[in-house]
Image (spheres, grey):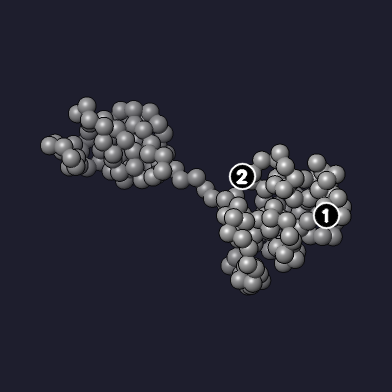
Amino acid sequence: MLEKLKERSDGLCELCSKNEATMGYTVSPKKDDVIENQVALCDECAANIEATDQSFYWRVIEGSIWNPEPSVQALSYRILQNYKDEDWASGVLSMVDLDEDVIQWGLSGLEIAAVHKDAFGNVLENGDTVVLTQALDVKGTNFSAPKGTVVKKIRLVHDNHEQIEGKINEQMIVILTKYVKKNN
């Protein structure tokens, strides 16, 4: 596949356009199964790809963001986001009009997965045991759970990092993570 990338890029890095392309870089979260998900990179760009302190070097992105390949646009956009507080990068971002799918692709590599944490910042996992840090009125039931109630084998609510599920009085309820402490 590297040969096809080199052919597409005339043998040059698709980011800096000055050095020889030596590798194919897959732009996450896409897979490396098709050339459309990859960018031809030189050794220098590959070495700096994860850096966030190479502002001067990455000014080469001012040209690559205009590349017709969506993978090059997405990677360029992602790198620009790391420097968006600098005038040169914010200027480029304000000028470029990319397809929304390309923007989302670029931003997806910057997303940090939300983590469920208790009131004290401890990371919660499925199956943990927690203790309530305050009394809670349980909506939809006729009881309240007093402070100190132990909730065993919690389940994380996958689309909301501020909520867990657990059984209190044999009833499965949703509990806000800010009201629990992990029981070690």
Q: Residues within 10 Å of mark 2 (few under 14, many from 20)?
A: few
The answer to which of 7 and 89 lies nearer the viewer is 7
Residue at point 38% right, 36% down? 156
| In this view, 129 is above or below 70 | above
Residue at point 74% right, 61% down? 67
Q: Residues within 10 Å of mark 1 (few under 14, many from 20)?
A: some
Residue 143 position within the rendered picture, expressed as x and y whole percent measured from the top left: 14, 36
Residue with the mark numbered 1: 9
What SS does tag 1 mark?
A: loop
Q: Amino acid at mark 1?
A: Ser
Task: Name the quadrant containing residue 19.
Answer: bottom right
Task: Name the quadrant containing residue 138.
Answer: top left
From this viewpoint, which residue is outermost toward the left?
142
Residue with the mark numbered 2: 29
Residue 29 position within the rendered picture, expressed as x and y whole percent measured from the top left: 61, 44
Q: Earlier in the sequence, mark 1 or mark 2?
A: 1
Residue at point 34% right, 31% down? 154
The N terminus lies in which quarter of the figure? top right
Q: Would residue 35 be seen by someone viewing this image from the given angle?
A: yes
Q: Would residue 181 be seen by someone viewing this image from the given angle?
A: no
Horizontal side of 179 relative to 108 (left or right) equals left
Distance, label 1 to label 2, CA atoms, is 22 Å
